[in-house]
Image (spheres, rainbow, N blue to C red):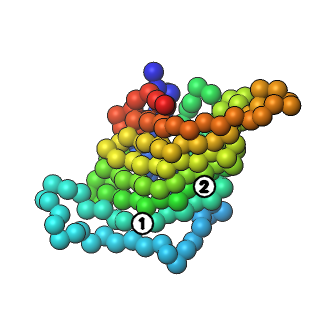
Amino acid sequence: PPPALGEGAWGRGFFPAALLAVLLQAPEYWVLSTESSGTADPPADKKPDEPTYFQANLRLRDVDLGELLARLEVKLPIRVGGKVSVNVAAGIPLDNARDLRSYRLDGTVTLPTLELQDLTLRDVTAKINLREGILNLTELTGTVPAPAADGTPGTFRGTARYGLDPQTDLTAD
Protein backbone atom coordinates (compact mmCIF):
# COMPACT_ATOMS: atom_id res chain seq x y z
CA PRO A 1 0.00 0.00 0.00
CA PRO A 2 1.04 3.62 -0.47
CA PRO A 3 2.60 5.47 2.46
CA ALA A 4 0.16 6.68 5.10
CA LEU A 5 -0.32 10.37 4.58
CA GLY A 6 -2.49 10.81 7.65
CA GLU A 7 -4.84 13.65 8.35
CA GLY A 8 -2.25 16.30 7.62
CA ALA A 9 -2.23 18.58 4.63
CA TRP A 10 -2.61 15.60 2.26
CA GLY A 11 -5.52 13.98 4.09
CA ARG A 12 -7.59 17.15 4.05
CA GLY A 13 -7.03 17.66 0.34
CA PHE A 14 -5.09 20.89 0.80
CA PHE A 15 -1.64 19.72 -0.36
CA PRO A 16 -1.06 22.50 -2.92
CA ALA A 17 -1.96 25.21 -0.43
CA ALA A 18 0.08 23.55 2.32
CA LEU A 19 3.13 23.23 0.08
CA LEU A 20 2.89 26.89 -0.88
CA ALA A 21 2.48 27.93 2.76
CA VAL A 22 5.56 25.94 3.81
CA LEU A 23 7.67 27.38 1.01
CA LEU A 24 6.51 30.94 1.73
CA GLN A 25 7.65 30.49 5.34
CA ALA A 26 11.13 29.45 4.18
CA PRO A 27 12.48 32.20 1.89
CA GLU A 28 15.99 30.74 2.18
CA TYR A 29 14.86 28.18 -0.43
CA TRP A 30 13.81 30.77 -2.99
CA VAL A 31 15.81 31.72 -6.04
CA LEU A 32 14.41 34.90 -7.50
CA SER A 33 15.03 35.46 -11.16
CA THR A 34 14.06 38.12 -13.64
CA GLU A 35 13.21 35.21 -15.94
CA SER A 36 10.29 34.23 -13.69
CA SER A 37 6.98 34.94 -15.28
CA GLY A 38 3.34 34.29 -14.79
CA THR A 39 0.12 34.90 -16.61
CA ALA A 40 -3.51 34.24 -15.84
CA ASP A 41 -4.75 35.02 -19.31
CA PRO A 42 -6.63 32.08 -20.83
CA PRO A 43 -5.53 31.04 -24.32
CA ALA A 44 -7.80 32.05 -27.19
CA ASP A 45 -8.60 28.38 -27.98
CA LYS A 46 -9.51 27.45 -24.37
CA LYS A 47 -12.44 25.03 -24.10
CA PRO A 48 -15.19 26.02 -21.64
CA ASP A 49 -14.55 23.02 -19.33
CA GLU A 50 -10.74 23.47 -19.21
CA PRO A 51 -9.29 25.16 -16.13
CA THR A 52 -7.62 28.54 -16.42
CA TYR A 53 -3.98 28.26 -15.38
CA PHE A 54 -1.54 30.66 -13.81
CA GLN A 55 1.76 29.80 -15.50
CA ALA A 56 4.96 30.35 -13.53
CA ASN A 57 8.60 29.33 -13.65
CA LEU A 58 9.75 28.25 -10.21
CA ARG A 59 13.24 27.53 -8.94
CA LEU A 60 13.97 26.29 -5.44
CA ARG A 61 17.48 25.60 -4.26
CA ASP A 62 18.75 23.30 -1.50
CA VAL A 63 15.39 22.54 0.12
CA ASP A 64 15.80 20.13 3.05
CA LEU A 65 13.68 17.21 1.85
CA GLY A 66 13.17 15.67 5.29
CA GLU A 67 12.08 19.00 6.77
CA LEU A 68 9.73 19.68 3.86
CA LEU A 69 8.07 16.27 4.24
CA ALA A 70 7.75 16.80 8.01
CA ARG A 71 6.17 20.26 7.59
CA LEU A 72 3.71 18.81 5.08
CA GLU A 73 2.93 16.01 7.55
CA VAL A 74 3.84 13.34 4.98
CA LYS A 75 4.55 10.10 6.81
CA LEU A 76 6.71 7.66 4.87
CA PRO A 77 7.66 4.12 5.92
CA ILE A 78 11.38 5.00 5.65
CA ARG A 79 13.56 7.97 6.53
CA VAL A 80 14.11 10.28 3.54
CA GLY A 81 16.61 13.13 3.47
CA GLY A 82 18.85 15.28 1.35
CA LYS A 83 18.86 18.72 -0.22
CA VAL A 84 16.73 19.03 -3.32
CA SER A 85 16.80 21.71 -6.00
CA VAL A 86 13.89 22.08 -8.39
CA ASN A 87 13.46 24.06 -11.61
CA VAL A 88 9.93 23.76 -13.00
CA ALA A 89 7.34 25.37 -15.19
CA ALA A 90 4.15 25.16 -13.16
CA GLY A 91 0.54 25.42 -14.22
CA ILE A 92 -1.59 26.36 -11.21
CA PRO A 93 -5.34 25.98 -11.79
CA LEU A 94 -7.18 29.16 -10.85
CA ASP A 95 -10.63 27.59 -11.15
CA ASN A 96 -10.02 24.73 -8.71
CA ALA A 97 -6.83 25.19 -6.69
CA ARG A 98 -7.78 22.37 -4.30
CA ASP A 99 -7.79 19.75 -7.06
CA LEU A 100 -4.27 18.31 -7.19
CA ARG A 101 -5.16 16.49 -10.42
CA SER A 102 -5.42 19.85 -12.18
CA TYR A 103 -1.88 20.96 -11.36
CA ARG A 104 0.85 20.72 -14.01
CA LEU A 105 4.60 20.60 -13.56
CA ASP A 106 7.43 20.12 -16.04
CA GLY A 107 11.07 20.49 -15.14
CA THR A 108 14.06 19.01 -13.40
CA VAL A 109 15.02 17.92 -9.92
CA THR A 110 18.55 17.40 -8.59
CA LEU A 111 19.87 16.06 -5.31
CA PRO A 112 23.61 15.91 -4.57
CA THR A 113 22.69 13.25 -1.99
CA LEU A 114 19.44 11.39 -1.43
CA GLU A 115 19.15 9.43 1.81
CA LEU A 116 16.72 6.53 1.79
CA GLN A 117 16.91 4.99 5.27
CA ASP A 118 20.53 3.69 5.42
CA LEU A 119 21.25 4.03 1.70
CA THR A 120 22.82 7.24 0.38
CA LEU A 121 22.53 7.84 -3.35
CA ARG A 122 24.60 10.57 -4.97
CA ASP A 123 24.17 12.92 -7.93
CA VAL A 124 20.49 12.07 -8.38
CA THR A 125 18.78 13.89 -11.25
CA ALA A 126 15.48 13.47 -13.06
CA LYS A 127 13.04 15.19 -15.35
CA ILE A 128 9.70 15.62 -13.61
CA ASN A 129 6.22 15.80 -15.02
CA LEU A 130 2.92 16.09 -13.13
CA ARG A 131 -0.35 15.54 -14.99
CA GLU A 132 -3.73 14.25 -13.83
CA GLY A 133 -2.36 13.73 -10.29
CA ILE A 134 0.44 11.40 -11.47
CA LEU A 135 4.06 12.39 -10.81
CA ASN A 136 6.46 10.91 -13.36
CA LEU A 137 10.24 10.94 -13.07
CA THR A 138 12.04 10.24 -16.33
CA GLU A 139 15.74 10.17 -17.10
CA LEU A 140 16.21 9.31 -13.42
CA THR A 141 19.94 8.80 -12.82
CA GLY A 142 22.35 8.63 -9.92
CA THR A 143 25.23 6.87 -8.24
CA VAL A 144 24.96 3.92 -5.84
CA PRO A 145 27.68 3.47 -3.21
CA ALA A 146 30.33 0.83 -3.76
CA PRO A 147 29.61 -2.50 -2.02
CA ALA A 148 33.05 -2.43 -0.40
CA ALA A 149 35.36 0.38 0.67
CA ASP A 150 37.75 -0.32 -2.20
CA GLY A 151 35.03 -0.97 -4.80
CA THR A 152 33.72 1.10 -7.64
CA PRO A 153 30.39 2.92 -7.16
CA GLY A 154 27.54 1.79 -9.39
CA THR A 155 25.05 3.86 -11.32
CA PHE A 156 21.37 3.61 -12.03
CA ARG A 157 19.12 4.90 -14.79
CA GLY A 158 15.37 4.52 -14.98
CA THR A 159 11.96 5.99 -14.36
CA ALA A 160 9.57 6.28 -11.44
CA ARG A 161 5.86 6.97 -11.11
CA TYR A 162 3.75 7.93 -8.10
CA GLY A 163 0.07 8.69 -7.96
CA LEU A 164 -0.64 11.68 -5.75
CA ASP A 165 -4.36 11.87 -6.49
CA PRO A 166 -5.57 9.21 -6.51
CA GLN A 167 -2.78 7.91 -4.33
CA THR A 168 -0.98 4.84 -5.72
CA ASP A 169 2.12 2.82 -4.98
CA LEU A 170 5.47 4.17 -6.08
CA THR A 171 6.74 2.18 -9.05
CA ALA A 172 10.19 2.30 -10.59
CA ASP A 173 11.84 0.73 -13.62
Identify the disc placed on residue 56: 1
Res. 55 image quadrant: bottom left
Q: Label 2 is placed on what type of residue?
A: Ser
Q: Label 1 is placed on what type of residue?
A: Ala
Q: Is residue 98 visible?
A: no
Above/below status of 126 relative to 5? below
Residue drawn at the location 82% of the way across and 26% of the way down:
148
Identify the disc placed on residue 165: none
Using residue 93 as the reference point, say whether residue 71 is left or right of it.
Answer: right
Residue 149 location (% of width, % of height): 86, 30
Above/below status of 87 relative to 128? below
The residue to which callout 2 is attached is 85
> Do callouts 1 and 2 mark residues in contact (Cβ within 8 Å)?
no
Using residue 82 as the reference point, say whether residue 108 is left or right of it.
Answer: left
The answer to which of 164 and 106 lies nearer the viewer is: 106
Above/below status of 3 relative to 99? above
Using residue 6 as the reference point, say whether residue 167 is left or right of it.
Answer: left
- Quadrant occupied by the N terminus: top left
Residue drawn at the location 70% of the way across and 42% of the way down:
122
The answer to which of 54 and 115 lies nearer the viewer is: 115
Residue 58 location (% of width, % of height): 49, 63
Residue drawn at the location 39% of the way across and 32% of the way down:
167
